[in-house]
Image (spheres, rainbow, N blue to C red):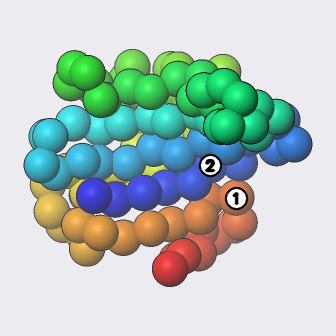
Amino acid sequence: MSRHQLRALNPDRYEVVVGWDRPLSTHFLIVRDLTIDDQVGDPVVVWLGAARRAFLPEVKRRASHYAVWPDGLTAALEDDRFERADPNRKLDWRTDPPTETP
């Protein structure tokens, strides 16, 4: 599963991650509200790709409400989908250029 962390429009409040889940054959988007303690409530605001297949245009549209969609990300996600890149790569798009994360 690939994982790409995006630069949130409100980084003090949200964490935004997109990627490709190979076992489920779907793109995904997870938006977490960092102000909600997971011991008290559910910090997940948006989770596309868990219950049903999520297509890249929908992921991009929904993610843009919470984060900057950088140039090159769409191509990177398509590379993940068609296995033209390491299927487990993790990139941090909050930096320019994006950096690999552990």
Note whether residue 26 is visible.
yes
Q: Residues within 10 Å of mark 1 (few under 14, many from 20)?
A: some
Q: Is residue 78 above or below residue 68?
A: below
**Residue 91, image x, y percentages:** 51, 66
Judge by depth and name the residue closer to the eye, 28 or 98. Answer: 28
Judge by depth and name the residue closer to the eye, 82 or 24. Answer: 24
Q: Quadrant of residue 54?
A: top left
Judge by depth and name the residue closer to the eye, 25 or 82. Answer: 25
Q: Is residue 75 left or right of residue 6?
A: left
Residue lying at 44% horizontally and 68% vertically, measured from the top left: 90
Q: Tell me which numbered mark, 2 or 1, is placed earlier along the sequence.
A: 2
Dot 1 corresponds to which residue? Answer: 94
- As shown in the figure, which amino acid type bears the numbered disc 2? Leu
Residue lying at 65% horizontally and 37% vertically, measured from the top left: 38
Contact (Cβ within 8 Å) of mark 2 with mark 1: yes
**Residue 12, image x, y percentages:** 87, 42
Judge by depth and name the residue closer to the eye, 36 or 20. Answer: 36
Q: Residues within 10 Å of mark 2 (few under 14, many from 20)?
A: many
- As shown in the figure, which amino acid type bears the numbered disc 1? Arg
* Image quarter in which the N terminus is found: bottom left
**Residue 95, image x, y percentages:** 71, 66
Residue lying at 70% horizontally and 58% vertically, measured from the top left: 94
Q: Is residue 15 above or below residue 40?
A: below
Q: Is residue 36 above or below residue 58?
A: below
Note whether residue 70 is visible.
no
Dot 2 corresponds to which residue? Answer: 6
Counting labels gives 2
**Residue 41, image x, y percentages:** 66, 25
Q: Quadrant of residue 82?
A: bottom left
